[in-house]
């Protein structure tokens, strides 16, 4: 790669170096700029002839060279003069090399010739209109260099790429992440090419040639060809190099979504690991193999299936674009892990099915590991993506799971004697120099434990902890095995008898610990047994400490303590200490109808490792107990930059629960529930850990309220159960919350349709669930009562009151009553505009009001509302600003359609779609929604041929990524059906509209406008197919409902009545 650079001569004049090659090229700066007129740029021949000093472009050369010198660089490169463009060969090589030249530069200077620094204005306002952002060549000049500094026309600094990243992302529609380092290489070639969609070049062919570096290809320049020909050649090059490109994009692992780390004790299984590796790589070694590779490993719990998968995944890491781990021990853990995958892959999926379908759609290679598939009644095939681009690895205790394997499955046997002995000695931390002398004793233990992997690790940890010598372990083990069989006779024939006996030996250590750590360890074990075995962040326990302190202060008698400002937590606890059974005082407190109130009695149920640490403001005892349990291999500890966490092997978890009799299970459930409940009063910064809490709160509430209520008196249990509901709501498990509330209604013999103010906290939960699950009638019934109560008891800016009002407005809209939503939402917006917090709720309320305006034909008001919102967002910079901006633009496009401003709608929605395409995957719901609305705009403009392929694309993607009953999918299918109808394609329209009507009948109330519109459209289709009887039945029903719900002159009511009259009068075909 030949290159020449610009430098100063001894006499201070700019000159070019001789040709430089490879390692001879010194460090250099590089300029990015927009050209003046060609005759005003300094060329190669100008410099070599000592001409061009009077040209406008000479100032740029001086600026670049001077700035480079200030940055300690002797050389610089500028495209205008460092390339001899009279040589087609050199020009060809230069254009093919230019991306690398920018990439290799020490620094890139962006010279904005149309920007003059104005210190009265923010920089981002000044640069956003610069021509530099519209040119094709400057795209690679922005992305390729590691360091990019911006300057105005006078050479004044404006900031670097990192400082201006948010504004650059907004101007260019390039994802913010892509602007950092070489992160843009994580995006597909197609995505990178789309970033240039709205850029221009002086010569049309350069529109393709400027993308060579971004596409990672080289090709000969042909300025005689058209832009279309050049792009087709470019895409053919990309396609031809697809295999090599995919090796770069996918075999270099981009996404490692595996929470488990490789155990340092992993021993043996070398041949098995290699065999599994070869089997899984077979997925993409043979292009003829169209069957997905699914490999199932079965075997006893604790035999090492998961550890083997971690080992194999690590060896295959660089062979797959994404390696994903999902704990399928429960539906909640599976959903949590699948959502983590979606978040990591920048996909907005919220359900397992959506993530599975997203993986089905991707053309990149992935490895999906499904761990703990141990439920004999569950069909695990729902977790298998379709297609052959990826491989699935499954672990199970059930031999029957072998049926899922498409290749020979593996029944994992115990380690052989040699490797089992090595594992035990490693776990016992016995120096390798002593192994030979201790091998016979170790082998005796191995035989006694039947080479069970987890049991040997447990035994080794016991010995390593100094609780016995290697030669003493056999006696200890036999004693605990006998005790286990006496206490639990059912273990006589259990295949896990030896495993449990080893665990019990570790429990004895905890029982006889001299300090509190042993008892704390037992308590932690019991608490974890009440939850799920998966990773539980320590934050729950930290928040429980903070929450308990907060609640204790709240419950203080402030009149007695007003002169005692430094009262300690211990003093507070002593003053409010009450018996562990409800007292008259407690009963009296409950008579004020605060059925969700947590009082000191609940706090006193907390485990000692929490309650005794309140004064110290530390969870030291809990962490120490976890460390002790980890030293005995009873739990695993996890650390990340966001949080610390603890987990249990499913077998240990089952044992920890089994060893508790029913009375102790009830006791520890109450402890655990109180701990989780008081955590809600803590800081609750759960964004990064919310999905990890989901399986634990699901497990906590798995027992029906009817069974839970007798655990303690009602006055004590009811606040606990209500807080269990709040926990489910906090982590967005609304389906689980609905089931839990149904159980609570039965236990209390109440109904949400019979409102009682005493149970207001329960009704708030029920209302939240109803809104989120689109049950508008129940939501309205509850929220009308709730908002009346709030109006009498809470300030107008109270967040809970505003939230209830917003939910009511949303429910009115969902129920086809937008007229009721409008005044409510307007009041909410007025309130939010007076406070600085909750700005996300302000935008949500504005968009909901836009929806209500549109539904009531107040389209001009809808347009004015969102134009105002959009104007206020123009200069907002922040992590969510682009998302909010696009949400608003999308809503404004809808308002334009409703207001008849179709051209404006098309222009705006085309822009929104382009922006989304540049920053999200094609399966992203926001992109698909915007494409759907753009199709609606085309339809409104009678451009049905443009709408049809777009709608086919949207519905195909949504069908793969959404559930059949999903509202977005059904709505898009409805628009597709009506588009077929408008094009006269009745045979295509009728089955689609029949399907839509059927789905709406199942999911929406009969008064909801979407359902009625679909029925009306199907009636029109039946008219076209001469099926007037069917049409009459449908349109008559629509008329009846619309007469009840719409005003006399409403267009939709008039439309339906006119069609019915035409059918009945026999004039429908006139």
Image (cartoon, helix red, strand yellow):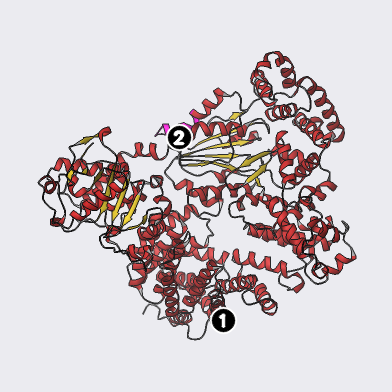
Residue located 75% across and 59% down the image = 721
Foreground pick, 198 / 1021: 198
> On the rendered image, what quadrant is the C terminus found in?
bottom left
**Residue placed farthest to the bottom in the image?**
1048
Residue located 77% across and 22% down the image = 469
Residue 870 place in picture, x, y as percent: 42, 70
**Label 1 SS:** helix
Q: Is residue 348 left or right of residue 40?
A: right
The residue pinned by badge 2 equals 319
Residue located 44% across and 61% down the image = 882
Between the C-alphas of marks 2 and 1, the distance is 62 Å
In the displayed structure, 777 sits above or below 746; it is: below
Which stretch did the figure color magenta?
A: 278-291
Q: Label 2: how many residues lie within 10 Å, few (<14), some (14-19) or many (20+)? A: many
In the displayed structure, 869 sits above or below 656; it is: below
Foreground pick, 62 / 285: 62
Q: Earlier in the sequence, mark 2 or mark 1?
A: 2
The residue pinned by badge 1 equals 1044
Foreground pick, 964 / 783: 783
Residue 198 in view (yes/no):
no
Q: Is residue 683 left or right of residue 356?
A: right
Q: Marks 1 and 2: in contact by CB < 8 Å? A: no
Residue 103 place in picture, x, y as percent: 32, 43
| Magenta-span inclusion, residue 830 | no
Q: Is residue 818 left or right of residue 799?
A: left
């Amino acid at each position: 790669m030949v290159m020449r650079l610009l430098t100063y001569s001894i006499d201070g004049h700019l000159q070019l170096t001789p040709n430089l090659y490879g390692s001879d090229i010194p460090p250099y700066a590089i300029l990015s700029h927009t050209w003046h007129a060609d005759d005003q740029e300094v060329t190669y021949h100008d410099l070599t002839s000592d001409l061009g000093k009077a040209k406008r472009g000479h100032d740029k050369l001086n600026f670049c060279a001077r700035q480079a010198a200030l940055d300690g660089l002797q050389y610089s490169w500028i495209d205008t003069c460092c390339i001899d463009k009279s040589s087609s060969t050199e020009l060809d090589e230069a254009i093919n090399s230019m991306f690398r030249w920018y990439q290799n530069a020490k620094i890139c200077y962006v010279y904005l010739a149309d920007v003059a620094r104005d210190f009265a204005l923010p920089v981002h306002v000044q640069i956003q209109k610069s021509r530099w952002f519209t040119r094709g060549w400057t795209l690679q000049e922005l992305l390729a260099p590691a360091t990019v500094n911006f300057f105005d026309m006078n050479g004044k600094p404006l900031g670097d790429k990192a400082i201006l990243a948010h504004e650059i992302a907004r101007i260019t529609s390039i994802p913010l992440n892509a602007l950092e380092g070489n992160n843009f290489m994580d995006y597909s070639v197609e995505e990178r090419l789309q970033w240039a969609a709205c850029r221009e070049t002086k010569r049309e062919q350069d529109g393709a040639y400027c993308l060579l570096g971004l596409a990672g290809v080289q090709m000969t320049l042909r300025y005689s060809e058209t832009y279309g020909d050049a792009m087709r050649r470019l895409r053919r090059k990309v396609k031809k190099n697809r295999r090599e490109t995919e090796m770069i994009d996918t075999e270099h692992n981009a996404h490692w979504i595996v929470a488990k780390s490789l155990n340092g004790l992993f021993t043996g299984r070398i041949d098995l690991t290699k065999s599994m590796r070869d089997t899984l790589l077979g997925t993409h070694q043979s292009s003829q193999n169209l069957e997905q590779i699914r490999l199932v490993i079965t075997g006893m719990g604790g035999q090492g299936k998961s550890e083997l998968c971690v080992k194999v995944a690590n060896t295959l890491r660089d062979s797959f674009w994404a390696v994903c781990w999902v704990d399928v021990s429960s539906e909640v853990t599976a959903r949590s892990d699948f959502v983590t995958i979606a978040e990591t892959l920048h996909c907005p999926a919220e359900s397992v099915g959506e993530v599975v379908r997203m993986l089905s759609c991707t053309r990149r290679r992935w490895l999906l590991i499904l761990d703990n598939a141990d439920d004999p009644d569950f069909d695990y095939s729902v977790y298998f993506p379709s297609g052959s681009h990826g491989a699935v690895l499954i672990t199970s205790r059930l031999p029957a799971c072998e049926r899922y394997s498409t290749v020979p499955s593996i029944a994992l046997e115990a380690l052989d004697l040699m490797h089992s002995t090595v594992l035990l000695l490693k776990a016992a931390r016995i120096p390798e120099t002593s192994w030979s002398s201790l091998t016979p004793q170790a082998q005796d233990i191995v035989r006694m434990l039947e080479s069970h992997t987890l049991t040997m690790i447990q035994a080794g940890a016991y010995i390593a902890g100094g609780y016995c010598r290697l030669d003493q372990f056999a006696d200890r083990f036999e004693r605990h095995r006998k005790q286990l069989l006496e206490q639990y006779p059912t273990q006589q024939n259990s295949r896990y008898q030896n495993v449990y006996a080893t665990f019990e030996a570790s429990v004895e250590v905890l029982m006889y610990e001299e300090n509190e750590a042993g008892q704390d360890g037992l308590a932690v074990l019991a608490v974890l047994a009440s939850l799920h075995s998966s990773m539980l962040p320590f934050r729950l326990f930290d928040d429980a400490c903070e929450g308990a302190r907060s609640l204790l202060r709240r419950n203080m008698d402030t009149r007695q303590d007003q002169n005692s400002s430094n009262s300690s937590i211990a003093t507070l606890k002593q003053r409010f200490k009450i018996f562990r059974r409800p007292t008259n005082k407690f009963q009296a407190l409950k008579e004020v109808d605060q059925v969700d109130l947590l009082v000191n009695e609940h706090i006193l149920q907390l485990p000692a490792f929490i309650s005794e640490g309140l004064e110290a403001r530390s969870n030291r005892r809990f962490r120490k107990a976890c460390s002790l349990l980890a030293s005995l291999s009873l739990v695993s500890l996890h650390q990340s930059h966001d949080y610390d966490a603890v987990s249990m092997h499913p077998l240990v978890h089952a044992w920890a629960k089994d060893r508790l009799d029913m009375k102790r299970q009830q006791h520890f459930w109450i402890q655990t529930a109180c701990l989780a409940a008081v955590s809600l009063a803590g800081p609750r910064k759960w964004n990064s850990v919310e999905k990890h809490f989901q399986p634990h709160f699901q497990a906590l509430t798995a027992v029906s309220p009817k069974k839970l209520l007798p655990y303690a008196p009602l006055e004590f249990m009811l606040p606990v159960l209500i807080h269990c509901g709040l926990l489910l709501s906090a982590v967005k498990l609304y389906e689980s919350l609905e089931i839990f509330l149904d159980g609570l209604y039965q236990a209390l013999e109440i109904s949400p349709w019979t409102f009682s103010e005493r149970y207001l906290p329960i009704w708030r939960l029920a209302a939240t669930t109803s809104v989120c699950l689109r049950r508008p009638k129940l939501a309205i019934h509850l929220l009308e009562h709730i908002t009346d109560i709030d109006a009498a008891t809470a300030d107008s800016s109270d967040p809970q009151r505003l939230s209830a009002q917003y939910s009511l407005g949303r429910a009115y809209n969902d129920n086809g009553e937008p007229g009721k939503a409008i005044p409510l939402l307007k009041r909410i917006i007025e309130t939010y505009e007076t406070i600085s917090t909750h700005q996300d709720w302000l935008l949500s309320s504005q968009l909901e009001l836009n929806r209500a305006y549109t539904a009531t034909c107040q389209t001009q008001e809808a347009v004015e509302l969102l134009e105002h919102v959009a104007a206020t967002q123009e200069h907002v910079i922040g992590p969510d600003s682009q998302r909010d901006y696009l949400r608003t633009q999308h809503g404004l496009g809808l308002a334009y359609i409703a207001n008849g401003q179709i051209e404006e709608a098309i222009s705006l929605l085309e822009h929104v779609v382009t922006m989304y395409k540049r920053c999200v995957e094609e399966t992203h719901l926001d992109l698909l929604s915007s494409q759907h609305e753009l199709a609606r705009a085309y339809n409104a403009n009678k451009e049905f041929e443009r709408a049809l392929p777009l709608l086919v694309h949207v519905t195909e993607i949504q069908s793969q990524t959404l559930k059949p009953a999903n509202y977005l999918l059904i709505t898009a299918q409805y628009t597709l059906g009506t588009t077929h109808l408008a094009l006269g394609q009745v045979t295509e329209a009728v089955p689609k509209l029949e399907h839509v009507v059927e789905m709406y009948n199942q999911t929406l109330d009969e008064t909801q406008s979407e359902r009625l519109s679909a029925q009306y459209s199907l009636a029109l289709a039946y008219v076209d197919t001469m099926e007037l009887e069917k049409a009459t039945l449908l349109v008559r029903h629509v008329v009846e409902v619309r007469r009840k719900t719409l005003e006399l002159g409403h267009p939709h009511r008039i439309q339906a009545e006119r069609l019915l009259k035409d059918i009945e009068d026999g004039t429908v075909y006139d």
